[in-house]
Image (tube, rainbow, N blue to C red):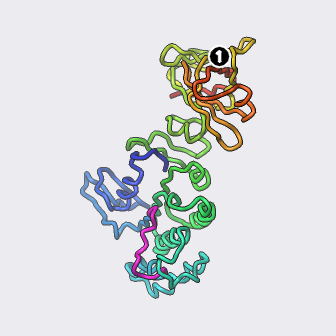
Amino acid sequence: MLGPNGAGKTTLLRALAGLDDMEGRVVLDGEVLEDTIQGVHVPAERRHAGLVFQDHVLFPHISVVENVAFGLRAQRRPQPAALARRWLDEAGLGDHADAMPRALSGGQAQRVALLRALATEPKLLLLDEPLSALDVSIRAEVRRELTRQLGSFRGVRLLVTHDPLEAMALADRLVVLELGSVVQTGAPDEVTARPRSRFVADLAGVNLLRGHAHGDHVSLAGDALVAAAEAGSGDVFAVIHPRAVALYKTRPDGTPRNVWHGRVDSVDLYGGRVRVRVKGPVPLVAEVTRAAVQELGLASGTDVWMAVKATEVSVYPA
C-alpha cells in the first residue's frame, strides 16, 4: 500500500488489526471481524493478525527470545521459548536469543519484530513501513530477509511503504491510497505504466497530464495542446517519459508537432543523468545527460524550448 503522508495508510492498518475504531466491514478468510452495521467487532487479540511497526516496538525489559515468545505464551502454545528459539535459529539470530533488545542493531531489531509477529502464525500480517527506520547500508539486507519471510507466509500480507524500490521488490499488487480513498490498484507494472494521480506519476518517474482528447491531440487547461497518435476522445491522461523530452536553446528546426517554450525551474542530479524541471504552458520534467546541461547552460531561470514526438505520448482514458 502506497500513498503520501496523511493518506490514511497507518490508520487503515490499525483499523484492520482492531486497534482503532472504524466504520465498515472487514472479512478475513470467511470470518467477519468488523461490521459496524451489524454491530460485529472481534477484539484485536482474537483477530489472528500480526502487526509490525516501523520502529520495532520490542519490549525493552525482556530478552529477544522472550519477545518472540510473547505472542506464543498469549496463545497458550506449548514450550513457547523453545519454539521462539527455533524461529530465531532459522533466521540466523540464534546467537542473540538471550540478548536484550538494546543490544541489537536496527536491522536485527526489525527482524526480531517480524519474527515475533510470524511466530504466532497469523492469518493477516500487517507491516507499517518496516524498513523506513533503517540505515540505507542495511536496508537491502533486511529487504532480502523480508522477501524470504514473506515468500513462505501463507496468509494475507499488507505492507505500507513510501519507497518505490520496496514496492517493486516486495509487492505482487499495489494499492494507492490518497486522502483516505483508493485511487489505483493493480500489479506494479500496470500501476506505474498507467498512473492515475500525480503521486503515482512521481513514483513512476514520468510526466502526467490530464485533458480532453480530440482524435490526434489532447487539449489541456489554459488552451495548451499536446499532439498524440490516436488520442481517442473524452477525458484522458497523457504520459510523457522525461527521456522523451528534448531541450533546445532556440526553437528547433523542422516540424515537430509538440514544441513549447518554457523556463527552467530546477536542475537535479538523478543517478547518472540530470532531471530538469521546466515551467511553461505544458510543464514537464526532462531527463538529459550532464554534457547536455553544460552545453545548453541549463540552470534555474534559463529559457529553453521543449520538443516531444507525438508517438512518445501515451494516452489512456481518465
Kindly identify the amino acid type of the residue bearing the numbered disc 1.
Val
On screen, 286 above or below 137? above
Q: State whether residue 230 appears in this view.
A: no
| Nearer the observer, 47 or 298 | 298
User: Quick one: 252 or 318, which is closer to the camera?
Assistant: 252
* Label total for image: 1
Q: Position of residue 227 (x, y in %)?
A: 63, 17
> Over which residues does the magenta segment extend?
53-64
Above/below status of 280 relative to 185 = above
Q: Is residue 235 magenta?
A: no
| Residue drawn at point x = 47 percent, y = 63 percent | 125
Residue 42 shown left or right of residue 208 in the figure: left
Task: Point out residue 54 in the picture as x, y percentages from the top left corner.
Answer: 46, 61
Q: Is residue 189 above or below residue 215?
A: below
Residue under pointer 1? 259
By secondary structure, the bulk of the magenta-drawn segment is best described as loop
Q: Residue at x 61, y 66 (%)?
A: 145
